[in-house]
Amino acid sequence: MFFFVLAFFREPKRIDDRPVPTIGQTFRNFATVLSNPKFMIFLLIFTGYWIVFWQQWIVMPVYLHQFVGKDIDVERI
């Protein structure tokens, strides 16, 4: 698939002729996003949920091996 994309992908044509933003403008836009407290709280809650969710599945095999039994088949979980 990688070679297929390299061979056949074409950059879409732009409808408007706006200049490409500079690195400085990109950093200013990023600072604008980071300075929005509602958005940052949303990101904190959203990422916190997924960290807790995936931590359960990361720790579950270790817990089962240590407290349930060494011969348990954790691949089936």
Image (cartoon, rainbow, N blue to C red):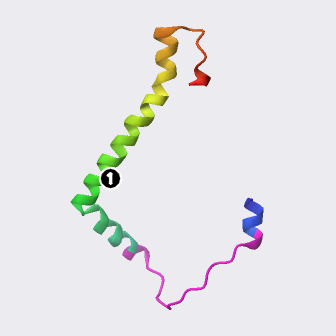
Q: Position of residue 71 (x, y in %)?
A: 60, 9
The C terminus appears in which quarter of the rendering?
top right
Question: Where is 17 relative to 25, above or below?
Answer: below
Residue plotted at (30% across, 47% down): 45
Question: At x 34% / y 48%, what residue is drawn?
Answer: 46
Q: Residue at x 33, y 72 (%)?
A: 28
- Name the magenta segment's main secondary structure: loop
Q: Is residue 24 left or right of residue 2?
A: left
- Residue depicted at x 24% and y 63%: 36
> As shown in the figure, which amino acid type bears the numbered disc 1?
Leu
Q: Residues within 10 Å of mark 1 (few under 14, many from 20)?
A: few
Magenta stretch? 7-25
Quadrant placement of the N terminus: bottom right
Q: Residue furthest bottom?
A: 17
**Which residue lies under the disc numbered 1?**
43
| Residue sitting nearer the eye, 49 or 26 | 49
Q: Position of residue 48 (x, y in %)?
A: 33, 42
Q: Position of residue 7 (x, y in %)?
A: 77, 70
